[in-house]
Image (cartoon, grey):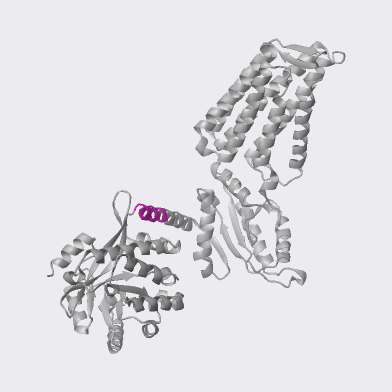
Amino acid sequence: MNIKIQCCGLVLLFVLGIIYSRKKTIRLSISRVFMRFFSVTFLCILLDIASVFAIVRTDLFSETAKNVICKLYLISITFTALWGLAYVCVEIYAIGKERRQVMLVAEIATIIGDLLICMLPLYSVHDNVRGTVYTYGPSTIATYLVALGMMLVSSILIFLNKNKMNRSRRGAILIWMVLWIAAAVIQFFIPELLIIGYAAAIGIMVLYLKFENPESNIEHRTGFFNQSALYRYINEFNRNKHDFSLLYIDIGINVYDTLKGFIADYLDKIPNVTKFAITQDELILLFQDKEYAETVIEKLLKRFGEGWGKGLAFYLQPNWIYLENASLLREERDYFYLLHRIKTNELQYVNNHFVRVNEEMVALMYKDSEREHQLSDAMDANRVEVFYQPIYSVKERKIVSAEALVRIKDEEGRIVYPSEFIDVAEKNNMILKLGKMVFEQICIFIKNHDMEELGLHCIDVNLSVIQCSYQSLAQEFIEIMEKYQVNPKYINLEITETASVSAKQRLLENMKRLMDYGVVFSLDDFGTGQSNLDYMLDMPVSTIKFDRELINAYFESSKAKYILEAVLQMIQGMDLQTISEGIETKEQLDMMEKLGVDYIQGYYFSKPVCEKDFLEYITSWK
């Protein structure tokens, strides 16, 4: 009997089944479908062997029994193809109308085909001399037509929905299909080569090794599922619109491995919770019941307050982020983006290291994400533009400089203002690239125009906190000025009080190198901080710019009026120049002149305008 190849396939699947059953598996719908697919393939090979026995051992099996077993084998082939289609569908479609419709049509077609297999005649051949055993006839042809039809439908679905499928999984499914179809064609023309079952077993093995191997989903240090498994888990829940809750726990990098072992053992005993180890120190727990999640979290917070290790001598203070309604997020990557945002911007401001994520926080994340994409797209497409706001000299009675302010344009050419993207740029370090682009445009402006002829002393350039703390800031700015042969005296860099606090030493190093090169500095937004006098003493600036809020308060509050006049007297005594922002009326201008402010900036003269309009404006002052 030529059943050696079928036995090889059967043993292969048996071994895979034993391995699979002994491993911790993540309960996904695609994994459940795979197991049914696996089981049907195993049954198909088993029936293939049984049909050979039935044909050969006529002394044990009657003609009717032989036909029943042989036709059951043929029916199992159609079911193997059907579950192959089901495996494709569960990868493409979420649980819903489309998937049910496709499978309903496939199931009806399979039932009709199986009825034909049962009704049509089937013949068998047993050649003792050549040692060949096989079946043929209309029933066999019907089997091939049904199975190949299922394969054709699967191929069409894969082609039409290839963007919805995991690329590697799509390739593995196609390998299975090619093996199966090739074996079917060979067996059709050479019926004594019974290789369909073995080819199906090899295809199943490919799928198992690439995607369904439980070992690939396990983080072995803790025994929890890994980040790859988390992506798959979240993807299925999102596609099928299942509600779930997520708890992120950051234990901390300084925790001993033995303590992490205690913690992992404790968490592993919590029932009805799916646990994931993302890194050596970060864990995620997923819950399908929100009330149960609240109960577990309460117990966890209490347990972590009791200490760990022998004698409970070690106390830990993890960072906790709880997303009660995780279905608010759209894609798997959004979860990690949200966690990163909260770790960076929220956890440092809460006393108990616990942040409960609400809808508002999620909505803000998506808004910032859209802004980040808009800014990135604008920088890549060179849609960054510099606007200039004129600065008036009280002494010279004319426009003598301008503050450069960045704008970007969206895809429709509409201007987007800094309030829409600067915060996002700073949070994601995109401000470094943006700042460099702006400075380069300013240097191009200075190179292309005669500053003396325009009557301009300099262009004021804002530096963000991140730029000030950037080690290569001075080097990059000097290289840009040299590239465009810009005289550094035309550059006035504005720093903020916040910048001088967060990275004072590096800022001073950058300032010294740039000042040695010939650049001057001014202190921007004076009046918004808490230690302004210290900044004036420590920072080597030549100009102090009063924030518009302080100026507005001067005209509304007697206290603010007294403070500004006193501070202004001190600044003048230190031989520093001053600029007032936010001047919008003639009365405000006259008062600032009376106080002795050196420069005026505000809508009274002009709002920030594009380069063309700025040039026209300053020309009108000549």
* Any part of residue 150 in sight: yes
- Report the residue at 63% width, 22% height from top: 147
On the image, the x and y values in percent for residue 587 come to 17, 76
On the image, the x and y values in percent for residue 434 come to 37, 61
Give the residues drawn in magenta, as a range: 371-381
Q: Nearer the viewer, residue 430 or 557?
A: 430
Residue 532 vs 5, above or below: the answer is below
Work out which residue is located at the far right of the displayed protein and give it: 59
Residue 378 falls within the magenta-colored stretch: yes
- Report the residue at 57% width, 24% height from top: 152
Q: In the figure, is residue 608 to the left or right of 161?
A: left
Q: In the figure, is residue 320 to the left or right of 221?
A: left
On the image, the x and y values in percent for residue 620 come to 13, 66
Residue 166 vs 457, above or below: the answer is above
| Screen quadrant of the N terminus | top right
On the image, the x and y values in percent for residue 69 come to 77, 18
Work out which residue is located at the far bottom of the displayed protein and give it: 573
